[in-house]
């Protein structure tokens, strides 16, 4: 169970927010390994061809999961970080907008498991699902280490969502 390895940080990044810090989980070898093993059981690996992770902490869980289930990994990055032709998607944040990008040739015709560390309002993952579809990928599900269920982010997403821990 990852509960003891998730640290609450009050008033970060702004007053009134209790941040769920995964740093203790990442530095605990047994906890991190168990997390990846448990994530691999959330969605049948036969149902997808690739794992896609979102910058930056989605890379941690996504690449480890991809190696664990013997699949390839594709990154979704912040603007200007990918060297070849990209598609981009902008989305709303509480405090403004952000943009993410993916290579145009990342996932055409491939079934994709989307991975990130945390699901909050769902904006980042919703934009990521749009990007995967735009480049010809077929998202099959989303996997998260943590879901902040009270923010109802999963309701914005049109594929099954799974989390190791739901608050």
Image (cartoon, rainbow, N blue to C red):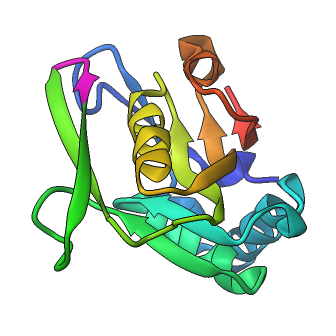
Residue 94 on the magenta segment: yes
The percent coordinates of residue 17 (x first, y second) are 36, 21
The percent coordinates of residue 74 (x first, y second) are 47, 72
Specify whether 163 is left or right of 138: right
Specify whether 82 is left or right of 72: left
Q: Which of 63 and 102 is in front in this view?
A: 102
Tell how many labels.
0
Specify whether 123 is left or right of 15: right
Q: Quadrant location of residue 15? A: top left
Residue at 16% in and 20% down: 95
Residue 9 on the magenta segment: no
**Secondary structure predominantly adopted by residues drawn in magenta:** strand
Q: Quadrant location of residue 106? A: bottom left
> Can you say which quadrant of the picture contains the C terminus?
top right
The percent coordinates of residue 102 (x first, y second) are 32, 61
The percent coordinates of residue 69 (x first, y second) are 78, 80
Q: Is residue 2 visible?
A: yes
Residue at 59% in and 26% down: 157
The boundaries of the magenta stretch are 91-95
Q: Nearer the viewer, residue 96 or 5?
A: 96
């Amino acid at each position: 169970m990852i509960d003891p390895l998730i640290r609450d940080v009050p008033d970060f990044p702004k007053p009134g927010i209790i941040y769920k810090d995964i740093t203790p989980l990442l530095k605990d070898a047994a906890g991190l390994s168990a997390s990846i093993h448990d994530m691999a059981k959330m969605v049948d690996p036969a149902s997808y061809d690739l794992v896609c992770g979102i910058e930056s902490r989605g890379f941690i869980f996504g690449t480890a999961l991809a190696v664990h289930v013997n699949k390839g990994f594709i990154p979704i990055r912040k603007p200007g970080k990918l060297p070849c032709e990209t598609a981009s998607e902008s989305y709303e944040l509480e405090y403004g907008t952000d943009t993410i990008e993916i290579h145009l040739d990342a996932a055409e015709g491939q079934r994709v498991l989307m991975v990130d560390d945390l699901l909050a309002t769902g904006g980042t993952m919703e934009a990521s699902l749009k990007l995967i579809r735009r480049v010809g990928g077929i998202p099959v599900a989303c996997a998260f280490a943590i879901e902040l269920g009270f923010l109802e982010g999963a309701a914005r997403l049109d594929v099954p969502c799974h989390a190791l821990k739901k608050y």
